[in-house]
Image (spheres, rainbow, N blue to C red):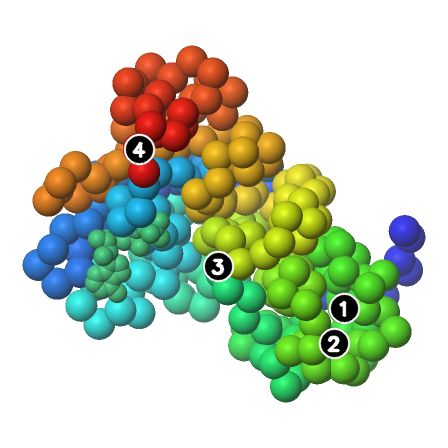
């Protein structure tokens, strides 16, 4: 579909970016939950984070866009580099990290009473971006198109977001994330609350989006990791110890020929 862009469209595509976690450790109070995690999430590649419950995948993901620090007892060490620049540099604003690194959560969380249209552009206000009505119309159409939802909602843009199905709400949340032109999109089990058909649609959407945004997804679904990601990282926490990465690399190799026996056991469903 060709959409005419207004001359000063607010969603001009940002170049693909690489994200890197360097020696990332995390604590809740005294309890350490991640120990020196190193992971490069290359530009334009979908990276999946897999591993049993409680090994620190979501904590790592939340550190990648400075959400971990919202928990009062939480602390961390290490660096998160977006194209080589540390997002935790004291000179950098929190809102910049959030603008460049979007997040889609497990449970779809649109603003339920707000219209579909207003849901998509909600992030503009939060990040202080100004846009004319034409620019907003363009943004809404292009983001809903990219999120694979436009055709289903084009005739009811003023209806509340809460009236959509779960899968549609999740795609609305993806569209909302895209509206601020993130360079990275983090997805924390985005399909775990969805039926298989909606899951497929989201996966197809992710594969399309990977052309313009680097995606990192936490998933418990091994088939999903294999379907959508080119790279994969296996997290594990031994009893009473903080989590870390056991092995990471191309998804085909991680599933077809893993180096570590624990990876082989996990991807073959022998634990977790
Ligand atoms: N807000 C919090 N306060 C205290 N401890 C927490 C908090 N959030 C997570 N934890 C603990 O940190 C550890 C890592 O949790 P995290 O949610 O990152 O794991 P996960 O691998 O994503 O698990 P799951 O797959 O079940 O979502 C767990 O032991 C968890 O209990």
Q: Nearer the viewer, residue 268 or 116?
A: 268
Q: Is residue 154 left or right of residue 261?
A: right
What label does residue 185 carry, if any? none
Identified at 35% across, 21% down, the residue is 264
Secondary structure type for disc 3: loop
Residue under pointer 1: 140
Mark 2–mark 1 Cα distance, whole angstroms, equals 6 Å
Residue under pointer 4: 271
Q: Position of residue 17 (x, y in %)?
A: 54, 42
Residue under pointer 2: 117
Secondary structure type for disc 1: helix
Q: Are marks 3 and 1 in contact (CB under 8 Å)?
A: no
Identified at 19% across, 49% down, the residue is 33
Residue under pointer 3: 106
Q: Which is nearer the N-term, disc 3 or disc 1? A: 3
Mark 3–mark 2 Cα distance, whole angstroms, equals 22 Å
Q: Which is nearer the N-term, disc 4 or disc 2? A: 2
Q: Nearer the viewer, residue 36 or 107?
A: 107
Mark 3–mark 1 Cα distance, whole angstroms, equals 23 Å
Identified at 32% across, 38% down, the residue is 272
- Against 118, residue 77 (above or below) is above
Mark 4–mark 2 Cα distance, whole angstroms, equals 44 Å
Q: Is mark 4 within 8 Å of ligand 1?
A: no
Q: Which is nearer the N-term, disc 1 or disc 4? A: 1
Q: Is mark 2 within 8 Å of ligand 1?
A: no
Instruction: Count neighbours of disc 1 (C-alpha within 10 A) and say few if under 14, some if 14 to 19, many if 20 or more.
Output: many
Q: Position of residue 56 (x, y in %)?
A: 28, 48
Q: Which is nearer the N-term, disc 2 or disc 1? A: 2
Secondary structure type for disc 4: loop
Q: Which is nearer the N-term, disc 3 or disc 2? A: 3
Circle 4 or circle 3, nearest the eye: 4
């Amino acid at each position: 579909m060709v959409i005419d862009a207004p001359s000063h469209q607010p969603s001009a595509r940002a170049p693909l970016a690489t994200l890197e976690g360097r020696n990332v450790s995390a604590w809740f109070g005294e309890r350490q939950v991640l120990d020196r995690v190193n992971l490069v999430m290359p530009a334009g590649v979908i990276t999946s984070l897999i591993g049993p419950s409680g090994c620190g995948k979501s904590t790592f993901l939340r550190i990648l866009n400075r959400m971990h620090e919202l928990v009062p007892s939480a602390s961390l060490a290490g660096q998160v580099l977006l194209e080589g620049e540390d997002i935790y540099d004291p000179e950098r604003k929190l809102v910049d990290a959030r603008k460049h690194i979007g997040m889609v959560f497990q449970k779809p969380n649109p603003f339920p009473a707000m219209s579909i249209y207003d849901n998509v552009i909600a992030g503009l206000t939060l990040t202080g971006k100004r846009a004319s009505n034409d620019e907003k119309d363009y943004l809404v159409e292009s983001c809903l198109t990219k999120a694979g939802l436009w055709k289903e909602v084009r005739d009811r843009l003023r209806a509340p977001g809460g009236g959509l199905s779960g899968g549609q709400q999740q795609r609305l949340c993806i569209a909302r994330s895209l509206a601020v032109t993130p360079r990275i999109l983090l997805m924390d089990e985005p399909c775990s609350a969805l039926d298989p058909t909606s899951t497929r649609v989201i996966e197809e959407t992710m594969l399309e989006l990977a052309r313009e945004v680097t995606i990192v997804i936490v998933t418990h679904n091994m088939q999903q990791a294999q379907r959508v990601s080119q790279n994969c990282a296996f997290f594990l926490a031994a009893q009473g110890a903080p989590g870390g990465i056991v092995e990471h690399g191309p998804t085909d190799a991680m599933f077809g020929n893993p180096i570590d026996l624990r990876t082989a056991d996990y991807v073959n469903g022998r634990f977790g």
